[in-house]
Image (cartoon, rainbow, N blue to C red):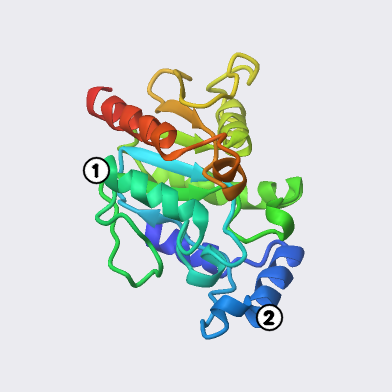
Amino acid sequence: MLPILQKEVINCRRCPRLTEYTARIALVKRRAYRDWEYWGRPVPSFGDPAAAVLILGLAPGAHGSNRTGRMFTGDKSGDILYRVLHKAGFASQPSSGSREDGLTLTGAYITAVCHCAPPGNKPLPEEIRNCRPYFERELDLLPTLKVVVALGKIAFDNYLDILKSRGLIRSRAPFVFGHDRQFSTAPGQPILVSSYHPSQQNTSTGKLNEKMLLAVFRRARKLAATC
């Protein structure tokens, strides 16, 4: 059951470096959020348990999701993502500032490669491996999935690694990451769509903009309706 799994995620302490870092950030805080009580723990997944589209990100932001306790909530990445999800018909509202703001997802579910905020936004390979069993169980508990949208190359590669470990693909080599690309992986498996991550680095440099990201989710909605 997904609720039981998310409780396990919240209580996870498999990665001492991340456990220490998220707790320390929650105490030190950022000046702009000094009145907030930070979440400071692993951030659970969020969305519709009957989702047709799964959105796979990298990891919570130290002062975003690690503060608010909800995926892509409270930072610049979430600002653009939720605007796009609202325009594409997946989110009930275009902004997300708090896990108690009433936002809901319909037909979509958001998870991440790593559920704890990592220093420098860079989880270590072993930390990604520690978190992977949670994602694998989510895949098994979301039987209505039609599309997986991987935000960034790490998410893309991690999903393909799972398919390879399950014997569903032979190699990652035929799957070349790029923005708004579509891949058929194996019979009976969701269509994979790759996208640049909506990080502030990508959006501030113009590598990714709202129109480009909206095209990804309009593609995902169309695929979910036709697959």
- Note whether residue 1 is visible: no
Disc number at residue 89? 1
What amino acid is found at the position of numbered circle 2 in the picture? Val
Q: Nearer the viewer, residue 167 or 226?
A: 226
Q: What is the quadrant of the C terminus in the image?
A: top left
Which residue corresponds to the image point at 37% horizontal and 36% vertical from the top-left? 214
Query: Would you identify the image quadrant in which residue 216 lies?
Result: top left
Judged left or right of residue 16, residue 114 is left
Give the percent coordinates (x, y) of residue 159. Answer: 55, 34
Judging by the rendered image, the residue that carries numbered circle 2 is: 28
Q: What is the quadrant of the N terminus in the image?
A: bottom left
Q: Nearer the viewer, residue 138 or 204?
A: 204
Tally of numbered discs: 2
Query: Would you identify the image quadrant in which residue 172 lies?
Result: top right
- Note whether residue 53 is visible: yes
Residue that lies at the very extreme toward the bottom in this rendered image: 35
Question: Do residues under tags 1 and 2 come within 8 Å of each other at their CB atoms?
Answer: no
Give the percent coordinates (x, y) of residue 109. Answer: 37, 48
Give the percent coordinates (x, y) of residue 175. Answer: 58, 18
Kind of element beneath mark 2 = helix
